[in-house]
Amino acid sequence: SSKRGKTKSKTQTNKMDLSDMMSNRRTIPVEDSPAKTESYKFVEVLDETIQSLLNRGDYLEALDFQHQGLQIRASLHGTDSQEYKDMLREVLNSCNNNGMKYLYEEKYDNALRLLREAETIVEQNVDQEGIG
């Protein structure tokens, strides 16, 4: 019971930190700088938030944060980077797996949204290794 409370607090803390960071967000710098270091910290908080949402079954909300993670990784590393490709693959797998969960639960609108998102990712990245 106390473990559950700690997990909830950590999720709430991460969401508050993420909200604060997003409200103060600027263009992500490409060169090494303190702002780039802050961007890496933001990515860590974002990834923790995504994982918390997925663990709770909030797949659609997690997808919104995953898109932000893709944009940030593209800015920091470029779309040809392994970091970007790994995140893209993670989003694709999440859409497919969680879309099927929604389908099994007969939540057809949610299932369709996630499965269409997976289809779009594949169509837009068919030239990426391991994606299309």
Image (spheres, rainbow, N blue to C red):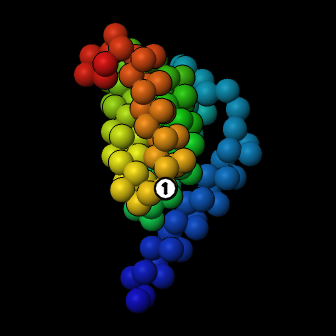
- Residue located 45% across and 16% down the image: 124
Residue position marked by numbered label 1 in the rendering: 107
Name the residue furthest top. 127
The residue lying toward the viewer, choosing from 41 and 71, is 71
Q: Residues within 10 Å of mark 1 (few under 14, many from 20)?
A: few
- Residue located 53% across and 74% down the image: 9
Q: Amino acid at mark 1?
A: Lys
Q: Quadrant of residue 1?
A: bottom left
Q: Is residue 77 left or right of residue 18?
A: left
Q: Is residue 130 left or right of residue 72?
A: left
Residue 83 shows up from this direction: no
x, y percent for residue 5: 48, 82
The relative height of residue 107 versus residue 88 in the rendered view (above or below) is: below
Name the residue furthest bottom. 1
Residue 129 shows up from this direction: yes
Q: Is residue 23 left or right of residue 78?
A: right
The relative height of residue 73 versus residue 47 in the rendered view (above or below) is: above
- Residue located 42% across and 17% down the image: 123
Q: The C terminus lies in which quarter of the figure?
A: top left
x, y percent for residue 114: 47, 41
